[in-house]
Structure formats: C-alpha cells, structure tokens
C-alpha cells in the first residue's frame, strides 16, 4: 500500500482546519499534530490541536532534528514532529496542515507528497471568515491578512489549487485528488 503525505496549505482563515476536520470524518487518515509556541485558543486542546510548547523547548527540538519541517511566522514557531509522521506513514495517509514555506520544505524531503493549496473565493470572504472565527485580535488578524499575498504567491509550486467556496464540494475535490494519486 502506498501511503501518502498530504500537505494542505493556504492563507489563514481560508478554512484549512475546517476541511481537514471533514476529511478525517470521511476516511481513515492520520493527522499530524504540530508543535507551536503560540498561545492556545480557548477551544483548543493540548495534544489534539497542537502540542503547545515554549520557545526554548522548540529550539531544543530543532537542534536535535526533531522536526520534519518547521517555520517561524506570526511571531511564533510551528513545526511537524518527524517521528510521528514517519511512523504513521507506514500504515496511513498523513495530513499536514501547514503554511507554504513548511509545505515546500516537506516536499523536498518527501517528493512523493501531494501539495494542495486552498484559496478563498475572494479576499472579502477571507476577511469575513477571519473576523467571524473570532479567535484573534484585530492586530493579529491584520498580520495574518498581510501574509495572504505571500502564501498565494507560492500557488505555482503547488500540485493542486482548491477554492473553498462550498465546503462540501472542496472536501469532495480533495478526497478525489487523494484517491487519484493513490491509484
Ligand atoms: P484556517 O484553518 O485556514 O485558518 P478555519 O478552518 O479556522 O481556517 O476557518 C476559518 C473560518 O471560516 C471558520 O469560522 C470556519 O467555520 C469558516 N469556514 C470554513 N470554510 C468555510 C466555507 N466553505 N464557507 C463559509 N465559512 C467557512
Ligand atoms: P494557526 O495559528 O492559525 O493555528 O496557524 C497559523 C499557520 O501556521 C497556518 O497557516 C497553519 O497551516 C500553519 N502551521 C500549523 N502547523 C504548522 C507546522 O507544523 N509547520 C508549519 N510550517 N506551519 C504550520
């Protein structure tokens, strides 16, 4: 069985987390739980949403080669624990929900990975989703929007671009891409 690394990227607020949650309901994928130094949102559970660790712990893990990829953005570190992913790939397709620098770096070490970028139907909708989510301050939302153009400028390196307008359709499309790549 060829198990795939599936990398899902896209601007903050586009709906990556929502899509991944739906995908996990539909099939037997493993989701890589990243480490981050950012503060936990009230709805998040340590060890499920992320492993929330200090900057010092994160830097130690970088030094010992513990990350398959990592990136510093939005004033924090985010990284994919290497051991978990390598182990899960023996028996599952593994989903990484990560930003573009990390996605492209993971593709270098795992060229067989499928790179999927999720884009919004338009900028107004993205802004509206970030506000409606209600998890960040105006200042943090502004930082996230500022990075949107950078994320979208990496579109050309991604294997597939999916517009998240109607959620179910976007999830169906991604599932289809994964199935096609496994044939
Ligand atoms: P990301 O993980 O990309 O930062 P989220 O999954 O947290 O984004 O989604 C941001 C907000 O947009 C959430 O409030 C979510 O419910 C909403 N959302 C996601 N997909 C859609 C969609 N297709 N249509 C409308 N709202 C959506
Ligand atoms: P958030 O703070 O909204 O949870 O995530 C911010 C950004 O970090 C998102 O684009 C998300 O995909 C990305 N991200 C989450 N985990 C990782 C990771 O392990 N590595 C990298 N490079 N980016 C990540």
Image (tube, rainbow, N blue to C red):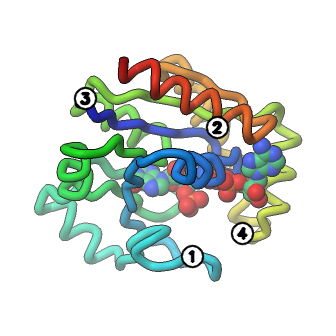
User: Mark 2 or mark 1, which has the lower sequence index?
Assistant: 1
User: Mark 4 or mark 2, which has the lower sequence index?
Assistant: 4
User: Mark 1 or mark 3, which has the lower sequence index?
Assistant: 3
The kind of secondary structure element at disc 4 is: loop
Q: Residue at x 38, y 32 (%)?
A: 104
Q: Residue at x 22, y 33 (%)?
A: 109
The quarter of the rendered structure image containing the N terminus is top left
Mark 4 neighbour class, 10 Å CA radius: few under 14, some 14 to 19, many 20 or more:
some
User: Mark 3 or mark 2, which has the lower sequence index?
Assistant: 3
- Kindly report the distance in space between the C-alpha atoms of the residues bearing marks 1 and 3: 32 Å
User: Mark 4 or mark 3, which has the lower sequence index?
Assistant: 3
- Kindly report the distance in space between the C-alpha atoms of the residues bearing marks 3 and 2: 21 Å
Q: Is residue 107 above or below residue 39?
A: above
Determine which of the numbered discs, if any, sits on residue 44 in the image. 1
Q: Residue at x 19, y 48 (%)?
A: 86
User: Mark 4 or mark 1, which has the lower sequence index?
Assistant: 1
- Kindly report the distance in space between the C-alpha atoms of the residues bearing marks 4 and 2: 25 Å
Q: Residue at x 49, y 45 (%)?
A: 27
Determine which of the numbered discs, if any, sits on residue 171 in the image. 2
Q: How many marks?
A: 4
Circles 3 and 2: CB atoms closer than 8 Å: no
- Kindly report the distance in space between the C-alpha atoms of the residues bearing marks 4 and 3: 39 Å
Mark 2 neighbour class, 10 Å CA radius: few under 14, some 14 to 19, many 20 or more:
many
Determine which of the numbered discs, if any, sits on residue 136 in the image. 4
Would you identify the image quadrant in which residue 113 lies? Answer: top left
Determine which of the numbered discs, if any, sits on residue 2 in the image. 3
The quarter of the rendered structure image containing the C terminus is top left
- Kindly report the distance in space between the C-alpha atoms of the residues bearing marks 4 and 1: 13 Å
Please say whether residue 75 is visible from this viewpoint.
Answer: yes
Front in this rendered view, residue 30 or 9: 30
Q: Position of residue 43 (x, y in %)?
A: 63, 78
């Amino acid at each position: 069985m060829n198990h795939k690394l599936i990398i899902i990227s896209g601007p903050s607020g586009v709906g990556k987390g929502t899509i991944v949650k739906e995908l996990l309901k539909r099939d037997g994928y493993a989701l890589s739980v990243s480490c981050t130094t950012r503060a936990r949102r009230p709805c998040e559970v340590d060890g499920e949403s992320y492993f929330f660790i200090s900057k010092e712990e994160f830097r130690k893990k970088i030094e010992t080669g513990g990350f398959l990829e990592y990136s510093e953005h939005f004033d924090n570190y985010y990284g994919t624990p290497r051991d978990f992913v390598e182990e899960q790939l023996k028996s599952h397709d593994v989903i990484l929900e990560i930003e573009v620098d990390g996605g492209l770096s993971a593709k270098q070490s795992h060229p067989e990975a499928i790179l999927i970028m999720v884009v919004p139907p338009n900028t107004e909708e993205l802004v509206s989703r970030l506000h409606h989510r209600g998890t960040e301050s105006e200042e943090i939302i502004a930082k996230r929007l500022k990075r949107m153009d950078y994320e979208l400028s990496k579109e050309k390196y991604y294997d597939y671009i999916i517009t998240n307008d109607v959620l179910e359709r976007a999830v169906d499309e991604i599932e289809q891409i994964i199935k096609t790549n496994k044939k």
